[in-house]
Amino acid sequence: MDIQAEVRKKAEAAKAASYKLGTLSTKVKNEALLAMAHALEQRSSMILAANAQDLEEARQKGVKRSYLDRLMLDENRIAGMAEGLRQTAALPDPIGQGDYSCVRPNGLSIRRVRVPLGVVGIIYEARPNVTADALALCLKSGNAVLLRGGSEAIRSNIAISSLLAEEAYKHGIPEGAIQFIDFTDREAVGVMTHLTGLLDVIIPRGGAGLIKRVVEDSSVPVIETGTGVCHTYVDESADLQMALDIAINAKTSRPSVCNAMETLLVHKHVAEKFLPMLDEAMLAKKVELRGCDKARAICPEMQPAEEIDWSTEYGDLILSVKVVDDVAAAIAHINRYNTGHSETIVTRDLVNAARFQKEVDAAAVYVNASTRFTDGFEFGFGAEIGISTQKLHARGPMGLMELTSSKYLIMGEGQIR
Amino acid sequence: MDIQAEVRKKAEAAKAASYKLGTLSTKVKNEALLAMAHALEQRSSMILAANAQDLEEARQKGVKRSYLDRLMLDENRIAGMAEGLRQTAALPDPIGQGDYSCVRPNGLSIRRVRVPLGVVGIIYEARPNVTADALALCLKSGNAVLLRGGSEAIRSNIAISSLLAEEAYKHGIPEGAIQFIDFTDREAVGVMTHLTGLLDVIIPRGGAGLIKRVVEDSSVPVIETGTGVCHTYVDESADLQMALDIAINAKTSRPSVCNAMETLLVHKHVAEKFLPMLDEAMLAKKVELRGCDKARAICPEMQPAEEIDWSTEYGDLILSVKVVDDVAAAIAHINRYNTGHSETIVTRDLVNAARFQKEVDAAAVYVNASTRFTDGFEFGFGAEIGISTQKLHARGPMGLMELTSSKYLIMGEGQIR
């Protein structure tokens, strides 16, 4: 098989369909999404059978249990995917919304309206539910998609995407708008990242390795998502019980996600009081602490933190801990080591709170709250396609609006310049 | 010299300065811009002397007269650069503007505000005035800059950038915020395009070759600007005199710019009447016409258009002409061959006008006006850093707002999830 030709053919089909898809009414898109949700539930046995084969092969390869868990589908998870499609149908349609208008002195009337990006490429890893989620958000925002899932979930993904595409085309979505790369050759990713002019953006969803590879290799614009080295800074004036509650929540409520805390910074004047509280509470939650020298002078049972710890996204029950001189030192540490995701200060000091929010360079900067809130649902945007950690186009949780571009519509009466 | 190390050092200095620059008040930024404008005029002789050397060297190399004209500075052009700085000072400051806010059911208060991108890399060609223009827009929007100009203008660019940097630093802009690559090795471009984590965006300004090279090579996000294969479609119902006025304006008022027309499409039912009018008027303006077979059947003195003509940005007094069956054929031709810049329909038909604006995929879609209006001043945004022809981040004229990103500021009272 000629991988290059095959991938390009799919992208061309998506591009051709994207023009019509971009002008569909909200009603047609919503009806298709609801029909797709219904079909998922009606025909779940077909999906579960494909998933059972993927699971069997993964087990034979001896992958980790946590990996199998991500790969595994059951009736509940399929119902969850269907529910996601219905929720996306219920969200407001951004397409056609105006966000600027004026009449120029020469009489030209200018409006700027939201339009789809065109064709969105999504490269993702294990979870087959991404196939349905990503597809729903792209369709609702009028975008065609080219999906490339992880090889371990290939049968599940083919089952889901072909079922959803078939149902979508029955309900007014133009044929070709939903493309899935139905073979596992790794070369396909390299081809996708060079389809300039066919793909308008690529969104990689997965581990830091995948994202780095795509960013470095792609000539198609990429939106970086989802790596989070998030910090909690406990200021001198913090309510220490609040700080402890926030720290426990940010570290332990779901340690594998990108908005979980990886490093705790504490002001030197409260370190002696706070760190033993932290140490005890984290021990109870089975969190391993890795401290700087000053932190270990207070809590000697902490492991020593190495330089690499400050920039590591553990995604696990591990926390690095550092004592800092003041809020300026905390900000400097964060701006040096963070990934631009989510940071929080616990403080009663208005000036320090304002300074932290102004100077910390990240998508979401909190005062007195857990970093775990950075996601589309918690921010009130509904489902998200990822959390952008770059500054271009979109920053933070990316919902439907972030899957759009704009277009200037200008009405004249014969104006020339 | 170690080019890699040298370029990286400049980018690191810009990055370090960017944190402070991003929090400067509008007042400080404006005062610096006004002082820089004053210094340009006061010390123009130093710039003109450097420019004379560049011109002399270019003449010896035997470059084209039009190229020399772009390179050349005089008192008027320096006054124009100073005026640009003053106009930028007068524009509203986008930094800190809020564009979203809500209070969530759990009491979290969320605001989204505009923040600088951070460090903007600009890679440009001959015109030395870009040094001052780009620098002013970046500073006003709180961004540090790393500039790389064309090698032919190296002395002029060094004179301008060092003068402006010196003056900026005297007036509160943090040292290091303005970086210029003061050597001509081409390797520098390749280094710049891989400074992921130091540069937040690269904006190439120049010919299609430069832009393509940067887009394909860069792992730093790029905004594509400035290539325009723009179309004028003369519909069946058009006022043909209006269509002619628009066509003449779009082709001949400034043929070298990106919003000039390159291809004219005409409905088959009016081609016999319109094309002879066009032919005569364009002949008077010394425009060479290249027609499709049907156009040449009406005006046999047209050159035959080749396939390559439909996708060529002539930037010159050449126009390709095609007869189409209807508005749908016009839209299909445009979406196949355009660069996503500016397109116009001349029509009295409301349905065709609406369809054209909805279905044509471009940054600016006009009804009954010349495509020449696509620029920042004409749209009311003031100066522009370029015209984006991509869909991500910014589309169309990019002013100060398009040089910003956003940040979520979240206030809590101890909320955990």
Image (cartoon, coloured by chain):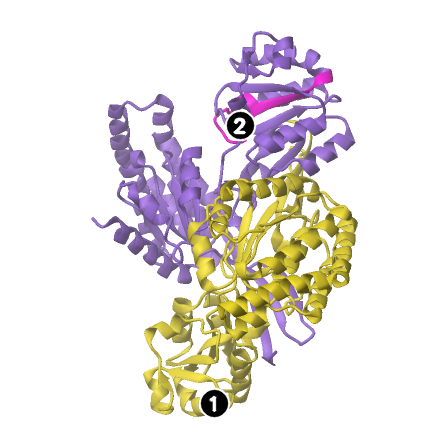
Chain colours: A purple, B yellow
Q: Tell which of A4 and B242 is nearer to you.
A: A4
Q: Tell which of A23 and B228 is nearer to you.
A: B228
Above/below status of B98 relative to B344: above
The chain that hosts pointer 2 is A
Residue that label 1 marks: B283
| Residue type marked 1 | Leu
The chain that hosts pointer 1 is B
Image position of B41 (left or right of B234): right
Residue A359 figure quarter: top right
| Residue type marked 2 | Ser
Where residue B141 appears, x then y in whole percent? 67, 51
Label ID, residue A311: 2
For the point 59% across and 43% down, the residue is B10
Question: Is residue A256 within the magenta segment?
Answer: yes
Image position of A21 (left or right of B251): left
**Label 2 crowding class (10 Å Cα cut-off): few <14, some 14-19, many 20+?**
some
For the point 70% across and 54% down, the residue is B164
